[in-house]
Image (cartoon, helix red, strand yellow):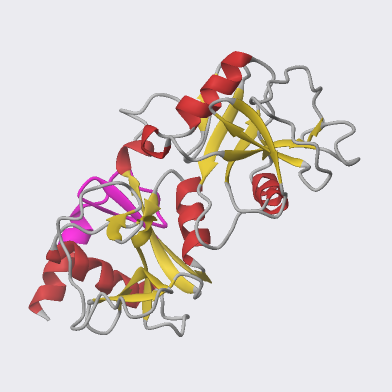
Amino acid sequence: MFQKLIFAFLLSVISAACPNESYEWQNNCYFYQNISAVFADAESYCSSIGGHLASIHDGFTNSLLTQKGEQYFTENTNINFWIGLTNMVTQGNWAWMDGTLADFTDWRTGEPNNISSNLNCASLSLIDSRWQTNDCLNKKPYVCKVEKSLFDRTTTPFKKCSGNFTYFEATNSCYALFYPYWGGRSWSFGEELCQTFNGHLTSIHSYEEMEFVLHVAIPNSLANVYPWTGLYSPDENESWKWSDGSKVDYVRWAIGFPIDDSTRSCVYLSSGGYNNYLCDKTSSIVCKIKL
């Protein structure tokens, strides 16, 4: 009881720039999402609001997240919720989705369970505040962690793009990378996802825009991630179109492409240029929103 009173006191005095639907702790805003989602979609949502699934770096925060979860997840039957820890980004190593150092763990006895190759994502238990491995395709509630500065109007300059999107002045557009994950990101799935943000898979109309997508929209740590673009062929590679309806006025195929195969009718971007590939294959995606 005394510990909970301490938590309540701290929460009462730490309310500043975070939105009302979140709470602030150590210069971060935490958003609890009661609607269950697979790990990849949970992370995608967190990314869309400018953050990631929550990382945890000390025991107090771990207990605090659990206590708040008990309050937010009363309408959900799950007894645990997603946090941002997975071993799928760096194969075999447990790492946080936000790239911060894995300097604290609170695994349940016998965890992490490496017996099954499907148990690659971590959840936090509402019962004992311990972590356990889960199948990443299980649907669970989750908590997003966003830096408070994103919402601090007194210290943050005006942003043309919301959430995790990055602005490119030359095109007056916003761009964001969404990772492939193990749930898959086919070309059509990527286009549908981008449309939920009122955008499309990225179109490219100059060398400068292509370089921006490769080196700015995609973090340096993911230099080998090749994203789907909005370029596709509606007629077995006889012609090519952008999914946003814009003119195909800049074409830079990589050496050896396009491959003369009518099943390879969707295009991803590599450092060498455009590559046509099977549309149902998994890749990361870059969404583009025209302002």
Q: Does residue 105 appear to the left or right of 214 in the view shown?
A: left
User: From the viewer's perspective, is 149 left or right of 275?
Assistant: left
Position of residue 87 measured from the top left corner of the image (x, y, whole percent): 34, 61
Q: Is residue 232 visible?
A: yes
Question: Residue at horizontal 51%, vertical 28%?
Answer: 214
What is the quadrant of the C terminus in the image?
top right
| x 76%, y 44%: residue | 264
Foreground: 191 or 80?
191
Q: Position of residue 69 (x, y in %)?
A: 33, 72
Residue occupying image coordinates x 73% and y 17%: 250
Position of residue 29 measured from the top left corner of the image (x, y, whole percent): 32, 51
The residue lying toward the viewer, choosing from 171 and 257, is 257
Location of residue 203 (image quadrant): top right
Q: Would you say 49 lies left or right of 145 here?
A: right
Horizontal and vertical percent position of residue 7: 16, 67
Relative to 204, residue 235 above or below: below
Whether residue 159 is visible to the viewer of this picture, yes or no, is no
Compare residues 257 and 7 and report the one nearer the observer.
Answer: 257
Task: Say which of 185 and 287 sits in front.
Answer: 185
Judge from the rendering whether residue 112 lies leftward or rightward of residue 195; answer left or right. Answer: left
- The quarter holding residue 238 reads top right
The residue range painted magenta reads 10-31
Quadrant of the image for the N terminus?
A: bottom left
- In magenta stretch: residue 14: yes
Q: Is residue 191 magenta?
A: no
Point out the residue furthest to the left here: 2
Residue pictured at 73% horizontal, 20% vertical: 251
